[in-house]
Amino acid sequence: MCCKGFLKIMMFIFNGLIFLAGGAILGVGIWVAVDSSSLLGVLNEIQDAPPELAQLANVGYLLIAVGAVLAIMGFLGCCGAITESKCMLLTFFIIVLIIFIAEVAGAVVVLVFQPLAEDLLQNFNNQFVKSIKDKYGEDSSFTALMNETMSQLKCCGFNNYTDFEGSPFVVNTLRYPVSCCSEDSRLCDQSQAEDGHVSGCFNAIVKLVEDNAIVLGGVGLGIAALEIAAMVVSMVLYNNVGK
């Protein structure tokens, strides 16, 4: 009886943590989906964007789906442990097992294709720079998204300030974006942009992706460990129900 009570407590704790982790992922997914000033907004404005980059817009919705499923599973696992329902415990085990297998397959895909992310962005250089030269200073939506991205990432253009040469903004104002100069510069001309040595957004984007990949990978490993523990405890509790 004492062992069963301990198992119920462990089941409740494990699934409570899964529920909280699912809620956190759900919140991140909602933030990514509604953040109109994010990098995804800039990518959507680029002409002739590769379809692989266009799919990045679905990341937020994927996180929402994963977070919602984990939150529901955590809730069902807690209910199954409290009510000692063999049907709920078995259903919980099967669903979590399916989710775990899917997560392992997804992690393998991410690890295999992660080295291609930087090459994909590098090949995107020409299209990105062309859009800057064609749209920056003329297309208000694209200009605002670029300004917000450069301000947040502390970067200038895709490679450096030279990406803006020939753009409507430079042609009409003979100035460069303020982000391309030092922080204390109110007006940014070519000489100030050269002296500023502000790096392009490509390196900043790669670093951002790598940092987020590490965080998401750590969260994923933690969730996988909790899922394994929850499956083990659910089966032990399943076998002890009615004894």
Image (cartoon, grey):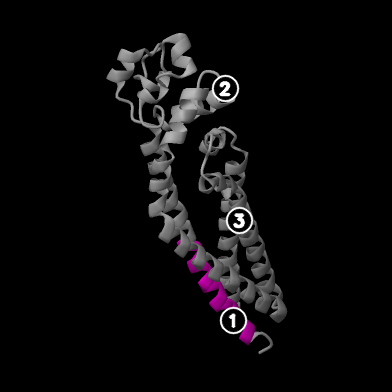
Q: Residue beneath label 1, please? A: 235
**Along the viewing direction, whichever of 202 and 96 lies nearer the viewer:** 202
Classify residue 205 as left or right of residue 48: left
- Distance from Cα at disc 1 to Cα at disc 3: 24 Å
Where does the magenta region start and end? 221-239
The answer to whether residue 120 is above or below residue 45 is below
- Identify the residue at image location x=42%, y=32%: 153
Is-magenta flag for residue 234? Answer: yes
Q: Quadrant of the C terminus?
A: bottom right
- The extreme left residue here reads 195
Q: In what quadrant of the picture does the N terminus appear?
A: bottom right
Specify the principal SS of the magenta part: helix
Residue indicated by mark 2: 139
Question: From what the image shows, is residue 145 above or below residue 85?
Answer: above
Any part of residue 208 in sight: no
Q: Of the residues shown, which amino acid type is indicated by label 2?
A: Asp
CA separation in Å, label 2 and label 3: 36 Å
Query: SS at mark 3?
Result: helix
SS category of the residue bearing label 1: helix
Circle 3: residue type: Gly
Q: Which residue, given by chain and number where applicable, does mark 3 sit on?
A: 67
- Across and down, in percent, residue 139 comes to 57, 22
Specify the quadrant of the image occupied by residue 84: bottom right
Q: Earlier in the sequence, mark 1 or mark 3?
A: 3
Q: Nearer the viewer, residue 13 or 68?
A: 68
Residue 203 among magenta residues: no
